[in-house]
Image (cartoon, helix red, strand yellow):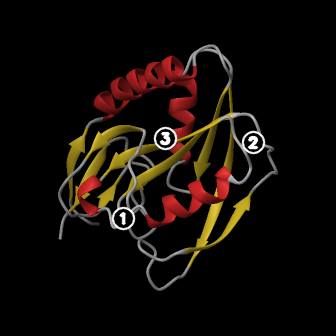
């Protein structure tokens, strides 16, 4: 088993998501919030954030098929809406587990804008602005990380494992 150094505790995550839910509700006002989670990394994040946002909230998931050679920087090849959801006129909050280079997120945001949402925001569990290769910023984020590394826990998997630990940690080298 890989060694993991805890970075964000389960309590810190829960507290931050309560605050993030309030920030998103304040941004949306009384309007419906539509969370769109990118599978599979954002699934746990979406489930907890959904419960932290008061008022009317709905959600769906999308899957992004990428080049298998380089999962982090590869251009997205296909977007798969698991159940078609019309986002025209809706306030959409796109949830991503880790926003690093911004390439995939930029592509997704461009494709989603074509569907004419009322508003479209990028929400990151972990935001790594120092790793950006495109001009993009997360509108909302739970945590900012600046160092390089591999992260696991709270739905983030390392080698298809460790997503079940309740905190976010850095995987040892």
Label of residue 101 in the image: 1
| Pointer 3 residue | 45
Q: Is residue 132 visible?
A: yes
Give left or right: position of 162 versus 95.
Answer: left
In which quadrant will I find the N terminus? bottom left
Give left or right: position of 126 versus 41.
Answer: left
**Image coords of residue 86 (percent x, y):** 81, 44
Question: Which residue is drawn at the image coordinates 32% and 42% (left, top)?
Answer: 167
Mark sitting earlier along the chain (3/1): 3
* Secondary structure of the residue carrying numbered label 2: loop
Mark sitting earlier along the chain (2/3): 3
At label 3, counting other C-alpha atoms closer than 10 Å, the crowd grade (few under 14, some 14-19, many 20 or more) is many
Question: Which residue is drawn at the image coordinates 56% and 47% (left, top)?
Answer: 43
At label 2, counting other C-alpha atoms closer than 10 Å, the crowd grade (few under 14, some 14-19, many 20 or more) is some
**Image coords of residue 56 (percent x, y):** 68, 19
* Secondary structure of the residue carrying numbered label 3: helix
* Secondary structure of the residue carrying numbered label 1: loop
Of the pair 117 and 142, the residue shown nearer to us: 117
When the figure is inspected, residue 1 is found, relative to residue 10, above or below; the finding is: below
Point out the frontmost of discs 3 and 1: 1
Question: Which residue is drawn at the image coordinates 51% and 43% (left, top)?
Answer: 44
Residue 23 quadrant: top left
When the figure is inspected, residue 155 is found, relative to residue 58, above or below; the finding is: below
| Pointer 2 residue | 87
Mark sitting earlier along the chain (1/2): 2
């Amino acid at each position: 088993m890989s060694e993991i150094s805890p970075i964000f505790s389960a309590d810190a995550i829960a507290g931050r998501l309560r605050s993030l839910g309030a920030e998103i509700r304040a941004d949306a006002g009384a309007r419906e919030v539509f969370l769109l989670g990118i599978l599979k990394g954002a699934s746990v994040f979406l489930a907890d954030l959904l419960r932290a946002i008061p008022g009317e909230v709905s959600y769906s998931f999308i899957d992004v098929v990428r080049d298998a050679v380089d999962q982090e920087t590869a251009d997205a090849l296909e977007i798969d809406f698991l159940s078609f959801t019309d986002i025209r006129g809706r306030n959409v909050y796109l949830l991503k587990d880790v926003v690093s280079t911004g390439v995939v997120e930029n592509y997704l945001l461009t494709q989603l804008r074509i569907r004419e949402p009322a508003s479209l925001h990028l929400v990151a569990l972990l935001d790594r602005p120092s790793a950006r290769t495109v001009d993009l910023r997360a509108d909302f984020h739970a945590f900012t990380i600046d160092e390089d590394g591999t992260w696991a826990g709270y739905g983030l998997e390392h080698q298809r494992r460790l997503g079940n630990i309740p905190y976010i940690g850095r995987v040892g080298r």
